[in-house]
Image (tube, rainbow, N blue to C red):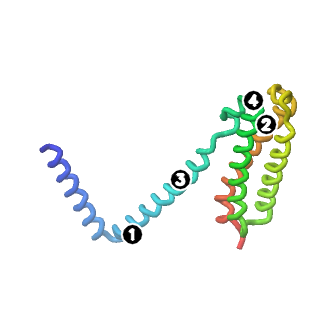
């Protein structure tokens, strides 16, 4: 019973405030509601983009990264490289009207991904065992660097269309 009285009181107060706002000079309640809805939609879309980026697990957190088993390492590294290639391709598809410097940046990321795919094919079982130096260490560092560069480019891709010169 107490909850229904509270709910009724709050609902009545809301509608009374709405009526007062609608009569006030300046922006109408409808205009304010539209503006609030637009701002909320923008915040939700931005959050969704951020969540999409955050869902990719970093190379250094995968089971393959820690594995000394050549097939497991190769499979995990191939999957990471393929995911990065898809992200780069997605940015490249949306960058047709982007400035030349940004398209060049995407081309460099694409070349780095291809280079790492070729280097992965050359890693031997013996090289895979040495985590602290040598080809595996270099590959791991370069792959982590590519991940950071792709994230940075994605962040820049969001801003490029808004700042591009017409």
| 93 and 150: which is toward the camera | 93
Assign a secondary structure to mark 1: helix
Single out the residue that lies furthest toward the left: 1
Give the foreground label among 1 and 3. Answer: 3
What residue is disc 1 on?
31
Q: Which mark is residue 111?
A: none
Residue 126 at x, y percent in the picture: 85, 27
Assign a secondary structure to mark 2: helix
User: Disc 2 or 4, which lies upstream in sequence?
Assistant: 4
Q: Residue at x 81, y 37 (%)?
A: 139
> Which image quadrant: the C terminus?
bottom right
User: Disc 1 or 2, which lies upstream in sequence?
Assistant: 1
What residue is disc 4 on?
69
| 15 and 96: which is toward the camera | 96
Q: Residue at x 85, y 36 (%)?
A: 123
Residue 62 at x, y percent in the picture: 66, 35
User: Disc 1 or 4, which lies upstream in sequence?
Assistant: 1
Give the foreground label among 1 and 2. Answer: 2
Q: Which mark is residue 141?
A: 2
User: Disc 1 or 3, which lies upstream in sequence?
Assistant: 1
Determine the CA span between mark 1 and mark 2.
52 Å
Residue 91 at x, y percent in the picture: 69, 59
Give yes or no for contact between labels 3 and 4 (Cβ–Cβ under 8 Å). Answer: no
Determine the CA span between mark 2 and mark 4.
19 Å
User: Disc 3 or 4, which lies upstream in sequence?
Assistant: 3
What residue is disc 3 on?
48
User: Disc 3 or 2, which lies upstream in sequence?
Assistant: 3
Give the foreground label among 1 and 4. Answer: 4
């Amino acid at each position: 019973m107490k909850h229904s009285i509270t709910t009724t009181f709050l609902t009545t107060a809301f509608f009374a405030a709405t009526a007062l706002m609608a009569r006030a000079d300046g922006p109408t309640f409808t205009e304010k509601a539209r503006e609030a809805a637009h701002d909320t939609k923008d915040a939700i879309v931005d959050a969704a983009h951020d969540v999409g980026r955050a869902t990719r697990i970093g190379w250094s957190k995968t089971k393959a990264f820690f594995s000394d088993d050549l097939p497991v390492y190769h499979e995990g590294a191939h999957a990471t490289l393929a995911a990065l290639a898809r992200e780069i391709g997605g940015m490249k598809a949306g960058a047709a009207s982007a400035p030349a410097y940004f398209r060049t940046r995407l081309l460099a990321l694409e070349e780095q991904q291809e280079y790492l795919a070729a280097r992965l094919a050359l890693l031997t079982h013996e090289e895979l065992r040495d985590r602290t130096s040598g080809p595996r260490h270099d590959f791991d560092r370069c792959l982590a660097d590519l991940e950071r560069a792709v994230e940075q480019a994605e962040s820049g891709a969001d801003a490029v269309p808004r700042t591009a010169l017409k």
